[in-house]
Image (tube, helix red, strand yellow):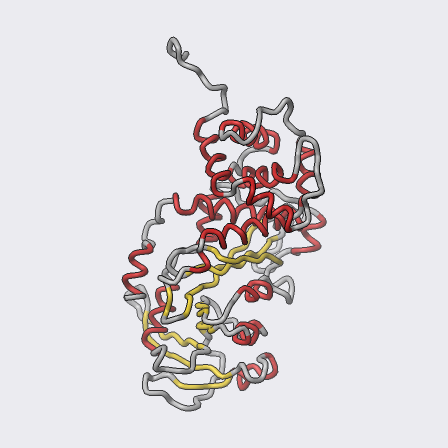
Amino acid sequence: MPRIGQFKQPDGDRLSDRVAIALLTRTYPPELVDRAVTESGSSGRRQRLLPPRLVVYFVLAMCLFVDKGYQEVARMLTQGLSWAGLGAEPSQVPTAAAISRARVKLGAAPLKALFEQAVKSSGVELTTDESYGRRRLLMVDDMTFDVPDSEENVMCFGHSTARAVGPSELPQVRVMALVEYATRAIVHAAAGPPANVADSTPADDLFTALRPTDLLVADHALVHTAQWAAAVARGADLLCPVGPEIALPIGRELPDGSHLSDLADAYGNHITAGHSRVRVISYTGGRSARLERHRLITSIVDHETAPAAELAALYSDRCEAESPLRDLKTRQMGRIETLRSRTPECVEQEIWGHLLVHHAIGPLLPTAPGSRTSDEWHGRLFR
């Protein structure tokens, strides 16, 4: 029972929930949301209770309160918007069916446009402190998420064969992201079927965001696909591991212990002519007492501007880096292991919603045990 003169909030109406909604609206103010809606061509699709701006905020709130149903999220959202001075208390809460229809009408484009605007306005993509020479350092992050077993999702994403196939297995969507090396900020992302389901992967779209002077450090080999040539053609450089089964004949040996080779000799026509010259770096290292032999390839053939020891250290530290997508899946989503969208378009919309929430709350999350802070990264890699 509240004390005399004390107001007791209704059950389920917590100040922390209203503050969380206010954080989202401060990170993504109405004018930024409206611009994203207009640029994506969704501004004309209006409903009385669910105009496009409100639906965008609903998707964000849905990804913030992952354990709540549609109507409960809508109630929490409208109360939070009212508390933040961005709306009045509603006379009625939309039904779950109405919200589902509004999400379908909105589509994924406004959420994607909002993410791109947020990254640009925050200055993340312009960071130069975490650079290698004059190159912006990026790494590839990769994660799969379960999606509902609807007919549309199965047709689009299929059932991954990476796990034992069984009647309860769910389709999966693969999310790939470009992540800034030291800040852990996601600067671009793409989603699609898992690699063993479709020939086209999210990397086909992901690498279009690379720009000249980028150095992309990958944790798995990309050299057997056209993505290597596409990235180099855009002026970006790559650094990634290759397995011992890949034959890379020794060309000219360099003073730092690396040597030049040609991917076309190992992969034939898979690498576009003119983009297949690589430098091979071998080193011994590891985090445990047992040291392992590693082999890397890079498109940076000049050993003076990028010595082998420095590139080996970059890759070694990338292996120890915390994964933002894993952080999103385990800490942001918590015990919820499956996205809630039953159509591919809404799955993509939901993914952008989770990325937007991560962008908003990421700086507030404590550093995971064992991971390095931004200062530690800067001190070790960019001294």
Considering every residue shown, the one lying at the far bottom of the view is 252
Q: Is residue 216 placed above or below 124 in the rendered structure? A: below
In the rendered structure, the answer to whether residue 277 lies left or right of residue 148 reads left
| Closer to the camera in the image, 63 or 130 | 130
Q: Residue at x 57, y 66 (%)?
A: 208
Q: Which quadrant holds the C terminus? A: bottom left
Q: Residue at x 57, y 73 (%)?
A: 230
Q: Is residue 66 placed above or below 318 in the rendered structure? A: above
Task: Give the percent coordinates (x, y) of residue 210.
Answer: 52, 67
Task: Give the percent coordinates (x, y) of residue 240.
Answer: 45, 72
Query: Number of marks in the image?
Result: 0
Task: Give the percent coordinates (x, y) of residue 72.
Answer: 57, 29
Q: Residue at x 38, y 69 (%)?
A: 315
Task: Give the percent coordinates (x, y) of residue 142.
Answer: 50, 59
Q: Is residue 36 placed above or below 127 in the rendered structure? A: above
| Closer to the camera in the image, 216 or 198 | 216
In the rendered structure, the answer to whether residue 110 lies left or right of residue 118 reads right
In the rendered structure, the answer to whether residue 263 lies left or right of residue 167 reads left
Q: State the image quarter where residue 98 is shown.
A: top right
Q: State the image quarter where residue 30 is shown.
A: top right
Q: Residue at x 32, y 76 (%)?
A: 309
Q: Which quadrant holds the N terminus? A: top left
